[in-house]
Amino acid sequence: MTVLSLVLAVVLYGSLLWTVRQVLCDPSDRLLRAVFRCLLCAGLSFPFGLPACVRVVDGLTGDGAAKLLQNLCLLGAVHFLGCFFIHSASGPADARARVRRQVVPFAATAVVVSAAMAVTPHADRGHTYATADMRVPGVAVFYLSAGAYLTYALAMALFWTVRYARLAGRPLVTGLWMVAAALAGMVLASTAREGLTLVRLLGGEVPRPVITGAKLLLDLAIPLFVAGVVWPGLVTRWASIRLWWHHGRVHRRLAPLWTALHTAFPEDALERTPSGRRWNVLSPRGARRRYYRRVIECRDGLVRISPYLALEAAAADADAPLPPEVAARHLRTALRAYASGAAAPSRAVPVALPEGSDSGLAADVRQLTRLSEALAAQS
């Protein structure tokens, strides 16, 4: 297996596994199902091109079986690719009707290539495209019919991809243009192979580097296509990972403040419903839930202790929010006063609130973090 084939296998099967997970999460999504079937057919076709698999399959079922299965899987991949765009552009009823119509050329091509392989002499079935004798009728029909359908289906997919890419936003547009570039390469390679097949059918000679170049173009386009299909999902997942990391970091930075307040007001802890799944502890959803819970518990604790803070920081303006650094200097004393049952003013005062035009949850969390870090620095 070459390095390029190895990279292709990693990208293809990694994408297939990711798509399987998405389909299991939402099995009713027609677009996801079409993408899954497209990648599945592409994944099934890959091993039939490996020499070791070709020897095993041909040894069990007869010469040319691996080549036929590989091409049928490729036809299925481009067929389901077309189904994806049909479902994207149509309502459920129209999409089902159009998909049924697209089955006709796909099934007809599958029958033709199977019949062509059946009538091809055994001695000519095992050759690759580069070494096949196109003057043998069965060989020529096999490659011409398969190539014609591939070119048609890929060109149709390219048309819809470019159309959608002009209207889409990020990150979808990036993935669509990657897919469009890959499809353009596939259409070019498929068209070139059709022309080369005709030249060889008519008895002309085609230099081996030209055939190799067309194959290389196709080999480069396939991983680019797969990468484009999964790009939006990867970008979304990367953003989710960054948010998960940020939530975990803030959760740790708020630990000194939360610990001090939770010790004084354990009854303010929000209800923790056990998930029953350890994975939820590390999942983005679990991290987000812990992040919001800690922020809310810290703010609730500050509201309760704020009268004692105002009493300790008597020099501060009672109507102005206590800055985080001021609150940190007096928080532990205020907590001891609360624990001793000392009297305090009846109203709460704002503590560590966002300043100026800075507002929102993120601004509030920044102030809480400043307070927590100032409190930890005094330890």
Image (cartoon, rainbow, N blue to C red):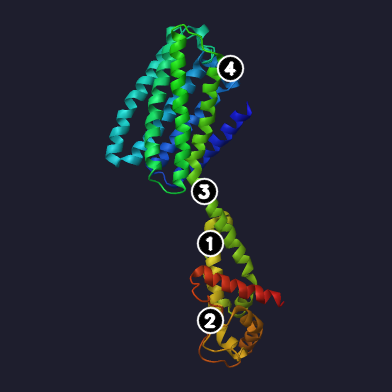
Label 1 or label 4, whichever comes before in sequence order: 4
State which mark lies toward you, 4 or 2: 2
Q: Is residue 336 left or right of residue 215?
A: right
The amino acid type found where label 2 is placed reads Val
> Considering the numbered disc 4 on the image, is that residue within a helix, a strand or a loop?
helix
> Considering the numbered disc 3 on the image, is that residue within a helix, a strand or a loop?
helix
Q: Is residue 240 above or below residue 191?
A: below
The amino acid type found where label 1 is placed reads Arg
Cα gap from disc 4 to disc 2, whole angstroms: 75 Å
Q: Residue at x 55, y 64 (%)?
A: 290
Label 4 or label 2, whichever comes before in sequence order: 4
> Considering the numbered disc 1 on the image, is that residue within a helix, a strand or a loop?
helix
Q: Residue at x 56, y 60 (%)?
A: 287
The amino acid type found where label 3 is placed reads Val
Q: Nearer the viewer, residue 61 or 294?
A: 294
Percent across and percent down for residue 368 are 58, 73
Cα gap from disc 3 to disc 1, whole angstroms: 19 Å
Q: Quadrant of the N terminus?
A: top right
Q: Which mark is residue 288?
A: 1
Q: Is mark 2 in CB contact (under 8 Å) with mark 3?
A: no
Which residue lies under the disc numbered 4?
55
Percent across and percent down for residue 288 are 53, 61
* Mark 2 surroundings within 10 Å by alpha-carbon count, few (fewer than 14), some (14 through 19), many (20 or more): some
Label 3 or label 1, whichever comes before in sequence order: 3
Cα gap from disc 1 to disc 4, whole angstroms: 52 Å
The amino acid type found where label 4 is placed reads Arg
Q: Is mark 3 in CB contact (under 8 Å) with mark 1?
A: no
Which residue lies under the disc numbered 2?
303
Q: Nearer the viewer, residue 235 or 211?
A: 211
